[in-house]
Amino acid sequence: MDHLEHQDKKLDLTDKLIFASNVETLWSLKDFFLVLEFLRDTHFTVSFWEDEENWASFGKENKAIGYIWRKYPLIIYQEDAEYKLIDLFAAFPFIIKEAVKDFLQPNYYIEHGKVKDLIPYFPNITKFSINDLWFYTNPT
């Protein structure tokens, strides 16, 4: 399981975002939709509004489990649901994984200067939640 680095009780996502943007694989919109199809075929619910969202959210048994970024091969998921994603990770080993405890708590951090070109609309804030990341990286 991947773990985040601690920085003043905030969990730093900077390196994970940079790594996902530089991963040595061809990530395309087709790959993104293949992952969504795989999730649906393995009985996950998937929500993605094309041309409105940069992330797809997915869940199982009425529980949100994770987000997958359309732009980069990055999946952020609830760590307690990792066992439900084993088949996905096996089918798409190039996807960068990040397990988190919670989507709602503002426990996360990025070094804005290092990722401002990757996520240009993300504000220079010191703490945010995973849901905030989703919100700020979707088109306005």
Image (cartoon, helix red, strand yellow):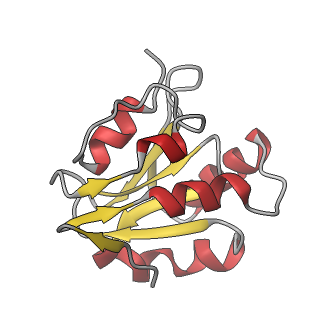
Quadrant of the image occupied by residue 90: bottom right
Residue drawn at x 48%, y 41% is 113
Furthest residue in direction front, as rendered: 113
Q: Taking the image as drawn, is residue 73 in sight?
A: no
Marks counted in the figure total: 0
Q: Nearer the viewer, residue 129 or 51?
A: 129
Which image quarter is the C terminus in? top left
Furthest residue in direction top, as rendered: 140
Where is residue 85? Give x, y as percent: 49, 74
* For residue 117, side relative to residue 132 (left or right): right
* For residue 42, side relative to residue 1 (left or right): right
Q: Taking the image as drawn, is residue 94 in sight?
A: yes
99 in relation to 112, above or below:
below
Q: Nearer the viewer, residue 106 or 54?
A: 106
Residue drawn at x 60%, y 50% is 36
79 in relation to 83, above or below:
above
27 in relation to 7, above or below:
above
Q: Nearer the viewer, residue 137 or 40?
A: 137
Which image quarter is the N terminus in? bottom left
* For residue 2, side relative to residue 131 (left or right): right
Quadrant of the image occupied by residue 28: top right
Residue drawn at x 65%, y 48% is 72
Where is residue 92? Give x, y as percent: 70, 69
Where is residue 69? Give x, y as percent: 55, 46
Where is residue 18? Give x, y as percent: 59, 55
